[in-house]
Amino acid sequence: MVNLRSATGLLTAAVLVAACSSSSTSAPPAASGSGQANGGACSLQILGPTRTQSGEQAAYEAVFAAFKQEFGCTVTATWQGQWSDIPQELDAARLANQPVDIVYDSTFNTTLAESGSLMDLTQVVSQFKDRFPASALADYTLGDHVWAIPFSDISTTFVYYNKTMFQELGLDVPKTYQDLVSVAEKIKSTKGIDPMIHRGKEPGYWPIWFMAAYAQTTGNQSIADTEDFLSGKRPIDSDQQAAQTLEEISQFYKDGILGQDSLATDGPGMEAAFLQQKAAMFFDGSWDLPDLRNANPSFEVGAFAFPQVQSGATQQSAGAADNGWAISSSTKNFAMAAQFLEFLTRPDNATKILSTFDPLDPSVVGVASGDDPLAQQITSDFRPNTIEYLDWIWPTEVTDAMSQAIPAALTGAQTPQAALASVQQAYQTLVSQKQYVFDWWTGWTSDQWAKVTPSQVPQLTIGQ
Amino acid sequence: MGARSTVGRILGSGVTYFILATVFLVTVYPLFWMFSGSLKSTGDFYGNVWGPPTTPQFVNYADAWTIGSLGGKIVNSVLITAGTLIVTVPLATLAAYAIARLRFPGRRFLFYLFLLGIAVPQGVTAIPIFTVALNLGLVNTRLGLVLVLAAQALAMEIFLMQSFFRSLPRELEEAAMVDGCTPLGAFMRVIAPLTKPGIATQVVIVGVGAWNEYFLTSLLIRSQDLQTLPVGLVYFSGRYSTNYPDLFAALSIGALPMLILFVLAQRQFISGLTAGAVKA
Amino acid sequence: MNSDRVVSSPVQAAAGGDRSVEQTRVRAARVRGMHPGRPHLSAHGQVVLSAYIAVLPALALFALFVIIPVFEGLWVSLHRWDGLSPMVWTGLDNYGYVLNDGIFWEAMWHTILFAIVTTVAKNALGLGLAVLLNRPLRGRSFFRTVAFMPVTLAFVMIGILWSWVYNPIFGILDGALDAVGLGSLAQGWLSDPNIALFSIMVVDIWKWTGFHMVVYLAGLQQVPTDVLEAASVDGASGRQRFWFVTLPLLRPVIIFNVLLSIVGGFTTTYDLVYVMTGGGPFHSTEVALTWIVSTTMRFLNVGEGSAMSVVLLVIVGAIGLVEMFLMTRGNSEDEVG
């Protein structure tokens, strides 16, 4: 691909700039820079999104230095752009002959793995897989192949509430939807504020509603049912449980729990409304907590699981280990790159880095949880009932269609059936236009596998 | 009659000042809001949205400066913006002059070619632009970014400048040419001084565009020490949360050079013309 | 600024009231008398040569980073490609998909509506304010400067500012309406699909009106007072003077401003829409550029995204040509088209 595209560019450029076409166009691909394991100058190149936590970059530098000391290999990181920019960044790096051995990344592992950009890590990770909670490793496993190792906080979703206000009004933490309705009515009648607010201006935050409710309407089969939908076995526009899910969600609107205000509110707006006591609850992820603590350390925040909308089902909510480490299939030094991942996830090294953002629920065993009062509730109550984000399974087009369908059904702009029909249509377009297959790993040729499978599995030095 | 017109005048100027007060409010308040946001604590930012900071946190500026390593980025931004202007403004002005004023074969074709250039949606040609820059060895260089940004601005500038040139009376350069000037000499001596409002407009539009450019810069610049200010702003936005007070401090620092450019350009709009008239 | 009336500009030059133009004319007449009949051919050759010298550098740069990428985009549009795996030739398939993409055409319509409404509003308001400020007022030059401010602000800041102005819970707009007893006018400014696009237009108009005002002001200050005085002596009312004297003299400035705002409406809407609504709710504020970027960068459907860009290019190009034709019609000898 790179060659084809360079060639196109070169051809067209040559028309007008024959005189300028310099030797740089014929530079050898990728090789320069990634050293050999036994050569004098071993080096590993990392590509990842900009590190924003104070002290995080320095912590990485310290770990790189320690790695060099132990394995004699220099590690250099390019922290560039935001997390969603990584596929582009990787593409640009490859075009620019900038070698990349290791990628720090997130949900896009699905995209990157499918495009053949990542090495299959199954066999090397088996040498140290007990360092990760099984569920976290599963987030980066597709079709029994491990594509990355989790290295971040494990996020989960729940309802935040204003504890002080609940106490003042003598409200109990709601368990069922009916409980929530009465709580909301009390809040509205005494305070005259929105009982609940959502960052609905950002479409990407609507699917968590679907995930939580669908988990219950399907009798906790939402992951399997979603995989069936994506394999074409269970069209979502004729999925009774999906329609019922949207009905349940729109009930929040009809009952005045969630209003149209939420469609115009973004993340900071949601937090501002909550902190200003102009909304009593919001449903979002554990990632909001540091912001809330930072903005007002004395604000009493409580948490409860998404309410029971379907009796008999377990209240599950969505979450995942947000980021992971993968090895680029363009690496010339797989063994050393794999060794680096092992080194990085040694508890003391992982602690150095992950502790810079005080994780509530770290994805590496042996790293201590942060000391937030809610950390305990999150790890013991919510984590066991956390299922993988459906938008890690849905292709982007389906995620986006769903992100539009949910608020449309919520506000009555569309019926649940019409909303789901648009999701099904997005799926069908994808199948016909991009030849989408859900389980792409089953259809790969041996050549495709050869490109991403290490020629020999390195024996890693497993440290403490 | 006299009484009526006095009342009318008072009423009229009341309305005028009311309108001006509104203009003042909607243009100056946002700036004030940015500066006051940059001095707030996080809690203040969310809790006291519209008012001034309760206790000014000047430390935000120091934090922003170190977290974003703004020093080097400002230097890069200034170099890129100035470089873009230095390349693109003379090129566009000259080309526009030729297209608007000189009769030569291919003139009409070139006019429409540049006109169509305006319709090219920039973001989506980014990858091909990257390929061309790569083939010329210009990726990850300031020069490469300057040339790319200059090229993107050309079409619009030429469009604007030629409409300016066409409004000038022909006698001007005819006179100069009869006086023994070449067409380009006539351009330099007689026309150029009259184009200051057009050039000031170009400088403002292209300058602000280059100063705030994010997308092409993030693709073409691959190393941290060449990054510009807008690209550096990602240091304040994590995946899920943004440090708004620090971000606003960085934005305030970044806005200053633009405000200076504006004040200078606005002088050109009005008073710079006078100088041109006196010299000619 | 006492020199306001002596400045030269396209407008004033056209009106013949500029001292320097007069001087040049006098000089030209004198020179003409001294050297009657210069050799015509060589002058023409000189003109052509100068023209090519003047155009060539711009053309080279333009070809390199605008034209070549467009052709490469055209090439990509004939393939299925995710930007990462190899390209697969699919002929015109992508164009078929674009034709059937309802959201794209809806976005196209929003783009056109956006360009028209904002162009009219920016120019009407800009000219109105300029007329207001063209009168001797205290603090006039201060206002000229502050009117520029919104243009300098970064989009990330504009996004959060206006989202919060429109915020239904603590927004300053609904708060202000409440304060003057118009609370019933409060709307879901960004959440109502019928209103959201217009709310974004307001922000765009806010950002650019001051800028256009300053350009108009520069034009107005160069309308020669003696012409206006003459019209006044002839019994023209203030309104008549504006419509029949000032406005025709402002024509070049108007063309300039209208072009600028139309082009802006088509090609620079991405950042603003992205920070305000991201195209929602329900695609009601989706413009062509946001949808193209989603298709290319989010869905990694680079082939179809390129096909959309080509379609957009053709449509905007056509509109641009028509607009050029209409605006410059009657511009006698300098007509390019």
Image: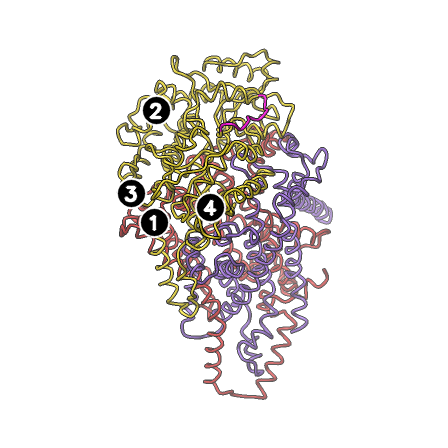
Per the rendering, the mark at residue A242 is 2
Per the rendering, the mark at residue C303 is 1
- The colour of chain C is red
Q: Residues within 10 Å of mark 4 (few under 14, many from 20)?
A: many
Helix, strand or loop at label 2? It is: helix
Q: Position of residue A87 (x, y in %)?
A: 42, 44
Observer-side mark, 1 or 4, equals: 1
Observer-side mark, 4 or 3, equals: 3
Q: CA distance from mark 1 to mark 4?
A: 27 Å
Q: Are marks 1 and 4 on the same chain?
A: yes
- The colour of chain A is yellow
Amino acid carrying mark 1 in the image: Gly
Amino acid carrying mark 3 in the image: Gln
Query: Which residue position holds label 3?
Result: A433
**Letter of the chain in purple:** B
Q: Nearer the viewer, residue C234 or B78?
A: B78
Query: Tags 2 and 3 in contact by the CB under 8 Å rule?
Result: no
Q: Is residue A3 left or right of residue A259?
A: left
Q: Position of residue A375 (x, y in %)?
A: 55, 23
Q: Main secondary structure of the magenta part?
A: loop
Query: Which residue position holds label 4?
Result: C114
Q: Nearer the viewer, residue A122 or A236?
A: A122
Q: CA distance from mark 2 to mark 1?
A: 32 Å
